[in-house]
Image: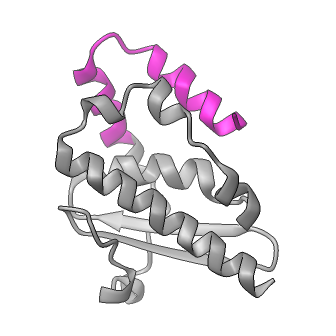
Amino acid sequence: MTIEEQEIIDEFSLFESWMEKYEHIIELGKDLPLIEEQFKTEENIIKGCQSLVWLRATHDGNLVQFTADSNAIITKGIIALLVRVLSEKTPNEILNSKLGFLDEIGLKEHLSPTRANGLVSMVKQMKAYALAFSAKA
């Protein structure tokens, strides 16, 4: 488990109810490294999400950086969690990440089926970028 994952688990343990946890997720979305407007294109939309979610990945030869945005506040917070954990990692670190923090904080079980599917799509897309970058290396 990464330092970022443990920090998230620790943060979520401070909240007693899922309403407080949802509020925290919304707050996290406000700190999301936003994708530039010019990259809010059809090709950067994550397929499988009910909301619009744009994700862009860049690679400096070693580390992958993600920027994202969403038109839904909860979804924006969810992608912010993933960006926080997976950005500034090598492609191999991203590909090998188990993202156990998602289960630890109970996020999957507290999402609607459509949001849960969207979460899976976000993770798949981030790992697909990592795979493409590792293939180029």
Residue most toward the top? 16
- As rendered, which of 132 and 43 lies closer to the eye? 132
Q: Is residue 90 visible?
A: no
Picture residue at 28% right of the left edge, 53% below the top: 117
- As rendered, which of 26 and 45 lies closer to the eye? 45
Circle count: 0
Magenta highlight range: 1-27
Split into 4 quadrants, where in the image is the N terminus? Answer: top right
Lateral position of residue 33 relative to residue 59, left or right? left
Q: Position of residue 120 (x, y in %)?
A: 38, 54
- As rendered, which of 113 and 20 lies closer to the eye? 113
Q: Quadrant of residue 100?
A: top right
Q: Position of residue 65 (x, y in %)?
A: 63, 68
Picture residue at 41% right of the left edge, 43% below the top: 28
Split into 4 quadrants, where in the image is the C terminus? Answer: bottom right
Tell whether position 80 is magenta. Answer: no
Q: Is residue 46 visible?
A: yes
Q: Position of residue 107 (x, y in %)?
A: 36, 32
Q: Main secondary structure of the magenta part?
A: helix
Tell whether position 24 is magenta. Answer: yes
Q: Quadrant of residue 133?
A: bottom right
Above or below for 115 versus 137: above
Picture residue at 30% right of the left edge, 41% below the top: 26
Above or below for 68 versus 36: above
Q: Position of residue 111 (x, y in %)?
A: 24, 37
Above or below for 35 versus 10: below
Picture residue at 46% right of the left edge, 35% below the top: 102
